[in-house]
Structures are given as structure tokens and as C-alpha cells.
Amino acid sequence: MRLGAFSRAVAAALVCFAVLTGCSGDPEPPTLDDSTRQLVADGDALMSLIESDLTGMTKERADQDRTTSCSSGQSQRYFVAKGNFTDPSRQDPLSRIGLLKGKLETLGYREVVDELDLWENELGVTVVVNDKAKLTFVLLGRLSETPNLVIVGKTECYPRNG
């Protein structure tokens, strides 16, 4: 009798192990819709930090497919915001890039390029990626040229629907 109970316990443990192992594999990659929603949410989070300081702002919130940097049959989505600070000397576009980068890092992004790679005093550039969401943001701040601030976020390339 004891052997039967032991066998059932071992079988139950093996089933639990198999279920847990099957669920702990690599997560499914995000779909274009998933990535687009995350892109817009993260872009909007950035804009909430600085939008009140900008004039002449334009914004595209990932509402159309683009094929510019994708292979044939693929497309991607972009979040693009551009604007000028009301007083660039006081609002310092270069330090704002650091603020925006910090926000993205709290959202799961990691820096892959920063302005120190460019050796340019009037220009701040940071590139961050979110490996899990398959997103990239390029943050650009300029002191002397307009627009003073450019934010470009993009999804990876996905197969085009239809």
C-alpha cells in the first residue's frame, strides 16, 4: 500500500514539475499591437514630464505603419515628438535628455548610446532599448538649433498584415 501512495506522490510531483517547467520558458515575443501600445504609453510618460515647457510641439503617436527601415513585407510603428523649449538657456535641453533617459530606465530600458560618444557640446543624444518590449527610443536635445527636443521611439520590424 505504501508503494502505491509513494508512486502517486512522485507522479504528482513530476506533473507539477512539468507544468512549471513548461511555463517558465522564454516569454512569447510581443505582437505589433502589444509593442505599439507600450510605445505610446512610454512616449506619453516622457511627454508628461516636459510637455508644459515646449512650444510648437508636433507629435505622432504610432498611428501608421512605416516601412522606411524594414525589409520588404515588414513595417514598424513610430512615436515622434518635436518641440522647442520656451527658454532653452534656462530649461537646458541637454539636461532634459538625462531626465527623460532616467524615466525610460525606470520603465525597463537600458542605455546603448549616450552623448559622450558624440563629443559635441551643443548636442545631447541618448539611445535606449527595451529588450522585452522590442522598443528603441532616441532622445535628442540641442541648444542652438530647433527643434530643441526630438523624441523618436520605434518598434522593431514586424510582418505586414494583409
Image: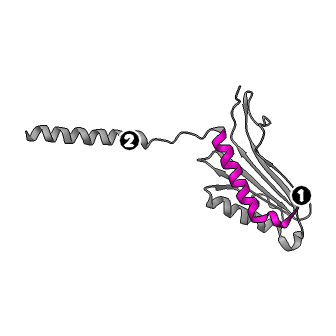
Q: Given the current orientation, which residue lies at the most extreme bottom position?
A: 90
Circle number at residue 67? none
Of 44 and 112, nearer the camera is 44
In the rendered view, does 108 fall on the left or right side of 26? right
In the rendered view, does 8 fall on the left or right side of 21? left
Label count reads 2
Q: Which residue is mark 1?
A: 147
Q: Is residue 132 above or below residue 7?
A: below
Q: Amino acid at mark 2?
A: Thr
Q: Amino acid at mark 1?
A: Pro
- Range drawn in magenta: 33-56
In the rendered view, does 56 fall on the left or right side of 109? right
The structure residue drawn at horizontal position 76% and vertical position 44%, both measured from the top left corner, is 62
Of 131 and 41, nearer the camera is 41
Q: Quadrant of residue 68?
A: top right
- Pinpoint residue 50: horizontal percent, then vertical percent: 78, 65
Q: Which residue is mark 2?
A: 21
Q: Secondary structure at mark 2?
A: helix
Of 114 and 101, nearer the camera is 101
- Pinpoint residue 149: horizontal percent, then vertical percent: 83, 59
